[in-house]
Image: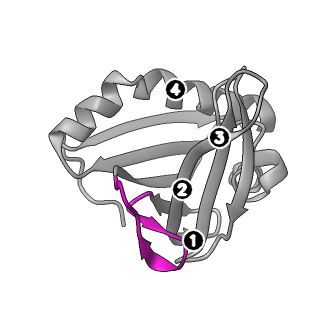
Amino acid sequence: MTPPFNPDLDLTISRIIKAPRSALWSAWTDPAKFQKWWIPEPARCEVAEMDLAPGGAFVTRISEDGGAFGPHVSGCFLAVDPQERIVFTNALLGGWRPAENPFMTAIITFKDHPLGTDYSAHVMHRSNADRTMHQNLGFNDGWGTVMGQLAKLVE
């Protein structure tokens, strides 16, 4: 289930990727593949934890200048429905532990399309201020860039 879009709290982005859902799913669930596309280049991603089960930890790190990796995403998977949907949040950490600074919950969906896969992200925020901040931080450019990187990896 994807909740209805709330324009005051949510952001969405989608793209038709010319590859089967299985290829996108593999790019999402294989840490070695995932870290190739998750962060806009030239920054680099490191997967620290990826326990693909409800309550499982989802932790990535970022290197923006080629140096040491620092914090990026620290969250928890809420739902993992093979080749259909991944839901994660940074409101919780692995093991359902509350996070210090919750910001968003993302629902990633994979749907068959005549050209490949309709890949979509529905990102929900707790307040309009958080939604606006995410938009101003470059949501469309950032998430659009990584969708392009994902497409390049799997197509």
Q: Is residue 19 visible?
A: no
Q: Which residues are magenta?
A: 90-102
The earlier-in-sequence mark between 3 and 4 is 3
Total marks shown come to 4
Q: Nearer the viewer, mark 3 or mark 4?
A: 3
Q: Nearer the viewer, mark 3 or mark 1?
A: 3
Q: Residues within 10 Å of mark 1 (few under 14, many from 20)?
A: few
Q: Position of residue 16 (x, y in %)?
A: 57, 34
The residue indicated by pointer 1 is 81
Disc 1 residue type? Asp
Q: CA distance from mark 1 to mark 4?
A: 25 Å
Quarter-wise, where is residue 45 in the image?
A: top right
Element on which disc 3 rests = strand
Q: Position of residue 59 (x, y in %)?
A: 62, 56
Say which mark, if any, is on residue 142. Answer: 4
The residue indicated by pointer 2 is 74
Viewer-proximal residue, 84 or 7? 7
Disc 4 residue type? Gly
